Amino acid sequence: MSRPTEFDLVSRLPVTHRRRIGWSDTDAARIAYTVRFFEFAMAGIEAWFREIWGEDWFHMNTQQQRGTPFVRVETDIFSSLVPGDILDVQVLVEQPGTSSLTFKVYGHKADTGERVLEGRYVCVVVRTEEGMAATPIPDGKRERITHYITECNRILKNKELKRNSALV
């Protein structure tokens, strides 16, 4: 079995990004350094852009002259991580604005399901050749986003129904 890398995709619906925590992710206390939790979430969001938007950030910037700077970032940390832990970050999207996207990220340990992080990340779509001016989400991308939201809601609702029926 191969070892997970930083860019392993576990699921496309909803996008779930997996990474192994390495020694380089830790601080003097030998646990994942606080700012790395933002990186873990952002890696999941970048996987979402590759899979759902259809472009990674590099190509979006260099070929489409579009960017998605983040204007609000918040993350709650519930559990520490140590080297060797495997973190799954699930990425959901709230209803998009005209130019903005709000991501909800949920991180948990792959082996135990233990909750590690939850966050909300808001970005704005901009045209980079126009001085970073906000621009509407392109229609084709908006359709992909709407489909993703609908499918994720259906999948998560079915999982919740199964979980609740198992408790009865």
Image: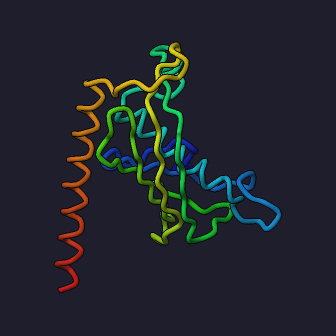
Please state which of residues 109 and 133 is positioned toward the viewer in this rendering: 133
Q: Is residue 61 placed above or below 49 in the rendered structure?
A: above
Give the side of residue 72 with respect to residue 146, left or right.
right
Give the side of residue 59 with respect to residue 150, left or right.
right
Please state which of residues 68 and 80 is positioned toward the viewer in this rendering: 68
Give the side of residue 100 with respect to residue 159, left or right.
right
Please state which of residues 94 and 77 is positioned toward the viewer in this rendering: 94
The residue most toward the bottom is 168
Residue 161: x and y in percent read 18, 70
Residue at the image position 53 percent from the left and 66 percent from the top: 116
Please identify the quarter of the rendering in which residue 20 is found: bottom right
Q: Is residue 125 placed above or below 34 in the rendered structure?
A: above
Residue at the image position 54 percent from the left and 64 percent from the top: 76
Name the quadrant of the C terminus.
Answer: bottom left
Residue 19: x and y in percent read 55, 51
Residue 131: x and y in percent read 55, 18
